[in-house]
Image: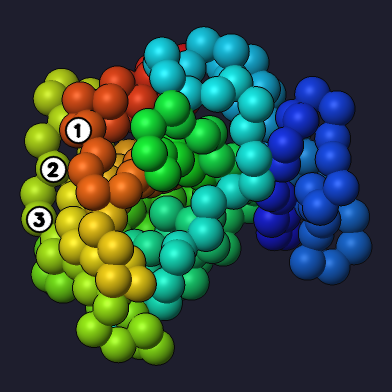
Amino acid sequence: MVIAAAVCGVLAGGAAGCGGGAADGLPDRDARAELTRLRGMLREEASRLPDGFSAKPRDGWAPPFQASNRHCRLILDTAGGHPPLREPEARVAVTYPGDRLGELAGVSLASYAGEDARLHFAELTKALSTCRVAKSSTAGRGTSFKVSGLKLGAVGGDVQGRRLRGRLNGYPYEMHLVFALTGHTLVSLVHTGVARVDAERTGRLARFLLDRAAA
């Protein structure tokens, strides 16, 4: 049974626009427990984020454009918490604003049943190796990103990272995408900013999230 939950604004108190429900009927007990675990993970850790990020999260991150290439679209949609191929049993997604120009850190945690998490991670790995240039299907030449490797240092576990650098609606923009698998949980991180994004900050965020997810 699928639960898709967007955990918004005030995690501790709930807010308009937050949602969660089953595809049909009420979620079963295990799915509810998993959703509670993922929500609690973000709630407990919000105040311990690396320096420069707000502990007051916003709605989950959404891709700023639809990629014309299906492999690029897969990774961007997954980073936005909406994987097109495999629906998770439970999912939470938030965005933490940073203190640099246009800086955002979007986090999505998705829990899968059985081998679906590993299968999805394998699909992501293949897509990441195939997506070389991410272009908008509607915005023409004003939105185009070159995709390259991203050095994160030692973050542990099964981790894939990419740097997308280019222009968004004509303006210089950069996105770092990190996907990691820990147990049955897929951790997605997108770190964005105008002109340049600090890879060291991305690495600190990734390690922070993975340490918590593994615990």
The answer to whether mark 2 and mark 1 are in CB contact below 8 A is yes
Q: Which residue is mark 3?
A: 148
Amino acid type, callout 1: Ala
> Along the horizontal axis of the image, is 49 left or right of 162?
right
User: Mark 3 or mark 1: which comes first in sequence?
Assistant: 3
Residue at 20%, 25% in the rendered image: 200
> Along the horizontal axis of the image, is 215 left or right of 90?
left
The percent coordinates of residue 162 (x first, y second) are 19, 50
Residue that lies at the very extreme toward the right in this rendered image: 25
Residue at 51%, 34% in the rendered image: 97
Viewer-proximal residue among 52 and 111: 52
Viewer-proximal residue among 46 and 141: 141
Residue at 78%, 66% in the rendered image: 23
The percent coordinates of residue 124 (x first, y second) are 29, 60
Q: Which residue is mark 2?
A: 150
Q: How is the image coloured?
A: rainbow
Q: Quadrant of residue 129?
A: bottom left
Instruction: Identify the secondary structure beneath mark 2.
Output: loop
Residue at 44%, 40% in the rendered image: 104
